[in-house]
Amino acid sequence: MPRIREVENKVLELLKTKPETRDDDNLLLVNYLEMIEDFEPMNFVATGIIENKIATRFKSVERCRRKLQADKPELRGRRWKERQEAQEIFKEYSKEAN
């Protein structure tokens, strides 16, 4: 599994160079996977998500994107504020459910 700093550096590069990835985690993941030297799209399709540990990488990529966007406003996408407001609404909802 790649170390988290390596993941963070790649995510940072993508957020800076490809602004379209700032609001789309799927696009961010695809671009991240393309940066990995040993990533073979056909291999990925053939062996599946779990065997390639892509699900774990996805979570790491997503967490790094969240941290970077929280720390660096210039890396936020157009929908960042909207996502933050939705998160607050969900927090309130989860408190009510108990």
Image: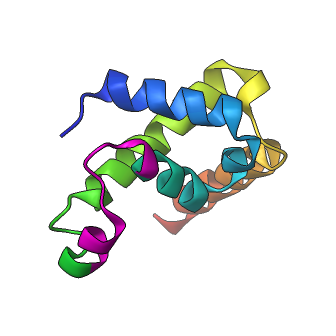
Whether residue 89 is situated above or below residue 12 in the rendered picture = below
User: What residue lies at 39% left-to-right and 53% top-to-bottom?
Assistant: 58
Residue in the foreground of this view, choosing between 42 and 87: 42
User: What residue lies at 46% left-to-right and 31% top-to-bottom?
Assistant: 10
Membership of 23 in magenta stretch: no
**Left or right: 28, with 1 as reference point:** right
Location of the C terminus by quadrant is bottom left
Q: Residue furthest bottom?
A: 46
User: What residue lies at 68% left-to-right and 20% top-to-bottom?
Assistant: 72
Q: Point out residue 56 in the picture as x, y percentages from the top left corner.
A: 27, 53
Residue in the foreground of this view, choosing between 70 and 56: 56
Location of the N terminus by quadrant is top left
- The image's colouring method is rainbow
Residue in the foreground of this view, choosing between 67 and 38: 38
Residue in the foreground of this view, choosing between 86 and 42: 42
Q: Point out residue 15 in the picture as x, y percentages from the top left corner.
A: 64, 35
User: What residue lies at 64% left-to-right and 54% top-to-bottom?
Assistant: 92
The region drawn magenta spans 34-45
**Left or right: 57, with 1 as reference point:** right
Whether residue 83 is situated above or below residue 43 in the rendered picture = above
Membership of 43 in magenta stretch: yes
Whether residue 15 is situated above or below residue 88 in the rendered picture = above
Q: Point out residue 63 in the picture as x, y percentages from the top left corner.
A: 45, 39
* Quarter residue 76 falls in: top right
